[in-house]
Amino acid sequence: MPPTLQAFWNKLNANEKLVMYGAGLAVVAFLLGAVASRGYFGTGSGDLIAAIVIAIIYWLKYSPNKINWPAPVQTIVLVIAGISAIFAILGLLAWIGFFGLDLYGIAILVNAVGCGIMAYGAWKEYQAMPKAASTPPAPPAPPAA
């Protein structure tokens, strides 16, 4: 692995690495589906875009330039990975129900697993982020007479 990518990988925590493993599976599934497509278009192409976007978000998170994110990075990644996983699982169920499990179906299965891993890692990272106090502090006691 090139030194720049190795340095980036070393900055990721365990949950972020889990998300990136899932993103890698989504990329592999896209390539497998492209080889076995038999004329079908877009095997997990939305999930491929989600995987790339998440990788870019993590890259920017650890870049030396500070970015003012519109929401916490954990929340952004969770939303992207969650939506990706929902559509991947729905696609898997539809494909198996209609066409069976051939090479293209295996690509869809790998895509669903990869997106599920991305969402699971993102959920774990979201749960690990520091939470703001949800209850206001108690009012001060009245002065003693």
Image (spheres, grey):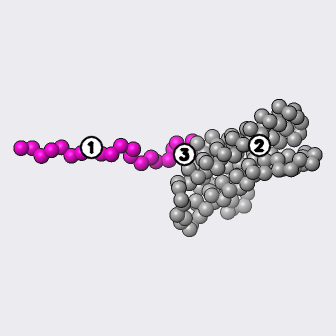
**Which quadrant is home to the N terminus?**
bottom right
Q: Residue 111 got which mark?
A: 2
Magenta segment boundaries in residue numbering: 124-145
Q: CA distance from mark 1 to mark 3?
A: 28 Å
Comes first in the chain, label 1 or label 2: 2
Q: Residue furthest bottom?
A: 65
| Residue 136, horizontal then vertical, whole percent | 33, 45
Mark 1 and mark 2 residues within 8 Å of each other at the beta carbon: no
| Residue 65, horizontal then vertical, whole percent | 56, 68
Q: CA distance from mark 1 to mark 2?
A: 49 Å
Q: Tag 1: residue type?
A: Ala
Q: Tag 2: residue type?
A: Asn
Q: How many marks?
A: 3
Task: Classify residue 15 as left or right of residue 30.
Answer: left
Mark 3 and mark 2 residues within 8 Å of each other at the beta carbon: no
Which of discs 1 and 2 lies nearer the camera? The answer is 1
The crowding category of the residue bearing disc 3, from other C-alpha atoms within 10 Å (few below 14, some 14 to 19, many at least 20), is some
| Residue 23, horizontal then vertical, whole percent | 71, 49
Q: Which residue is mark 3?
A: 126
Q: Secondary structure at mark 2?
A: helix
Q: Nearer the viewer, residue 46 or 126?
A: 46
Q: Tag 3: residue type?
A: Tyr
43 in relation to 58, above or below: above
Q: Residue furthest right?
A: 38
Residue at x-position 74% and y-position 42%? 88
| Residue 44, horizontal then vertical, whole percent | 78, 47
Q: Which residue is mark 1?
A: 138
Task: Classify residue 80 as left or right of residue 34.
Answer: left
Q: Secondary structure at mark 1?
A: loop
